[in-house]
């Protein structure tokens, strides 16, 4: 080797390796001690240096590019009619309570089916549907996850994003949305008096955390078989104060104890005292097949305890922060598009998400005769059927109000500084279900509206209690959101809502169904794009 070549390699190779490795893992924010979490439960405005530590935790993503230099390659599935694609999945995994099942869903179709059959029964038709969806999910090379725990008792103190990413051979980035500091259900230092000593003992065991392992972090993640070049967190406008408002609700309950202690506990279980707020996690991912070799993945989680107008303000704030991006953008996540103020929920769901022995507590709830079988946060009203399962439908004051549509209208009209836009096209040949209309290419439509991603246990045959909460929005190589004659390179195709997969076990793998979409690396129509 000549001296000149050696010098070139000496200077160039370390730089290339650094780029492949992405952000330095040492940049991870420091974790909070249990004593610091106790302080955060007592005040919204902690003193320095705890305030600075909390701020860094809420604004600095955890990045792990462990597999960037490994031999693991993207799956890059080839789809009939459109060629090789980037398959993207989005899933609100409900904290990761069923992490082992989620791992199987992403990696082992046969193992997932066997595990599902051990927990319940599936007829031959449903088994075939589940297997088809699991195989599709397995080929996802980018995965967007909402509601991801790190160091929470309810998920056995596991680092959900890291464990799932390493099991799948994927790089990942995790951003903290909330630090969970409820003195009752998270920190275990608040007592609720229950007359029955057996129930009291059971509750104490359920709620008492391990101070040495409790970290109290809950957030969102992006997994990728492609290297992660950079990442950042965008904090969104506050639409619900998860510290002050939740504390106030607790105080009001304490002042008006009309019920027995057992019933009070059930009413309190819906509360969540948290530091932090809604956010978007943004990651630049290096994908060699793209013109600039780069795509930006935006994982967004909008507020549930607020009006549709405030969710639209959160989306506007996010769009203003990504306006300058000149390459393709994939925006996905849980937008909580219920059409009203509050999340569709029930005491059963709240217990499932908070207590490990949830079946025991559901049984007790029903036995105590409280409003346990009714939704607490929002009974689903039968609204205008034009809005049901289609929050994109036009807002018609008085005769057909739909204020959730404001959010979608703003996304559709948004323009990046390079004049790029999100793809709102909907054509029957671009999806698997022969549906047209708005966003049908990127989000699975049904006979009426969209396929729901969240369904209450009691939905009265689908008349109420079904919601399309989780969405894809893709900025490909186009200059207008809809119309003819535009390129389909990296444009959304063949969206699937995997309700059969999610419902393969009695209580669901999560309370949301996963969704996928395919983005072709080449224009399947060979039409002229814009470059």
Image: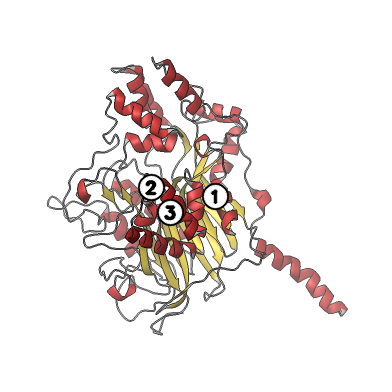
Circles 3 and 2, Cβ within 8 Å, touching? The answer is no
Q: Is residue 238 left or right of residue 141?
A: left
Do residues under tags 1 and 2 come within 8 Å of each other at their CB atoms?
no
Q: Secondary structure at mark 3?
A: strand
Residue 162 is situated, as x and y percent measured from the top left of the image, at 58, 50
* Residue labelled with disc 1: 161
Residue at 16% across / 51% down in the picture? 384
Mark 1, secondary structure of its residue = helix
Task: Select label 1 or label 2 by which is in front.
Answer: 2
**Is residue 241 in view from this perspective?**
no
Task: Give x and y (percent) for residue 141.
Answer: 51, 64
In whole angstroms, how far apart are the C-alphas of marks 1 and 3?
12 Å
| Contact? badges 1 and 3 (CB < 8 Å) | no
Residue 392 sits above or below residue 417 on the image: above
Tell which of 36 and 504 is nearer to you.
Answer: 504
Q: Which residue is mark 2?
A: 120
**Residue for point 41% across, 78% down:** 80
Nearer to the camera, 456 or 3: 456
In this orientation, does residue 33 appear?
yes
Residue 160 rendering spot, x and y as whole percentages: 54, 46
């Amino acid at each position: 080797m000549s001296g000149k070549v050696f010098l070139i390699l000496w200077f160039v190779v370390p730089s290339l390796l650094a780029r492949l490795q992405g952000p330095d893992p040492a940049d991870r924010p420091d974790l909070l001690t249990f004593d610091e979490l106790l302080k955060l439960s007592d005040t919204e405005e902690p003193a320095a240096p705890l305030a600075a530590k909390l701020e860094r935790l809420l604004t600095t993503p955890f990045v792990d590019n462990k597999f960037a230099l490994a031999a693991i390659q993207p799956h890059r599935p080839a789809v009939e009619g459109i060629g090789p694609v980037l398959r993207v999945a989005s899933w609100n995994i409900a904290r990761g309570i069923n992490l082992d099942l989620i791992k199987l869903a992403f990696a082992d179709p046969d193992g997932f089916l066997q595990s599902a059959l051990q927990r319940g029964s599936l007829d031959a038709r449903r088994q075939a549907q589940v297997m088809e969806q699991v195989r599709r999910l397995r080929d996802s090379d980018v995965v967007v996850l909402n509601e991801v725990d790190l160091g929470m008792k309810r998920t056995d103190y596991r680092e959900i994003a890291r464990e799932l990413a390493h099991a799948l051979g994927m790089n990942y980035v995790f951003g903290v949305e909330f630090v969970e500091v409820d003195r009752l259900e998270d920190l275990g230092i608040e007592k609720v008096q229950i007359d029955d000593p057996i129930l009291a003992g059971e509750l104490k065991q359920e709620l008492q955390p391990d101070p040495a392992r409790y970290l109290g972090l809950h957030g969102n993640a992006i997994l990728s078989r492609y290297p992660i070049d950079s990442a950042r967190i965008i904090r969104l406008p506050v639409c619900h104060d998860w510290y002050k408002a939740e504390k106030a609700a607790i105080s009001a309950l304490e002042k008006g104890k009309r019920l027995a202690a057992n019933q009070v506990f059930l009413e309190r279980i819906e509360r969540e005292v948290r530091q932090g707020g809604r956010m978007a996690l943004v990651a630049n991912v290096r994908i060699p097949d793209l013109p600039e070799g780069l795509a930006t993945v935006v994982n967004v989680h909008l507020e549930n305890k607020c009006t549709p107008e405030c969710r639209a303000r959160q989306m506007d704030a996010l769009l203003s922060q990504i306006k300058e991006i000149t390459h393709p953008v994939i925006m996905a996540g849980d937008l909580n598009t219920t059409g009203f103020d509050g999340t569709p929920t029930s005491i059963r769901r709240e217990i499932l998400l908070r207590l490990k022995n949830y079946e025991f507590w559901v049984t007790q709830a029903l036995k105590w005769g409280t409003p346990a079988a009714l939704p607490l946060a929002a009974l689903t009203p039968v609204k205008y059927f034009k809005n049901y399962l289609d929050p994109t439908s036009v807002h018609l004051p008085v005769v057909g109000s739909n204020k959730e549509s404001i959010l979608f209208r703003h996304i559709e009209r948004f323009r990046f500084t390079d004049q790029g836009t999100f793809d709102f096209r909907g054509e029957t040949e671009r999806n698997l279900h022969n549906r047209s209309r708005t966003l049908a290419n990127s989000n699975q439509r049904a006979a009426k509206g969209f396929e729901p991603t969240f369904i209450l246990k009691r939905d009265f045959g689908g008349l109420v209690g079904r919601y399309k909460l989780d969405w894809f929005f893709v900025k490909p190589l186009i200059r207008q959101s809809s119309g003819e004659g535009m390129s389909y390179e990296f444009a959304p195709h063949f969206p699937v809502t995997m309700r059969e997969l999610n419902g393969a076990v009695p209580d669901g793998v999560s309370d949301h169904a996963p969704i996928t979409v395919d983005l072709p690396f080449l224009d399947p129509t060979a039409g002229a794009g814009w470059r």
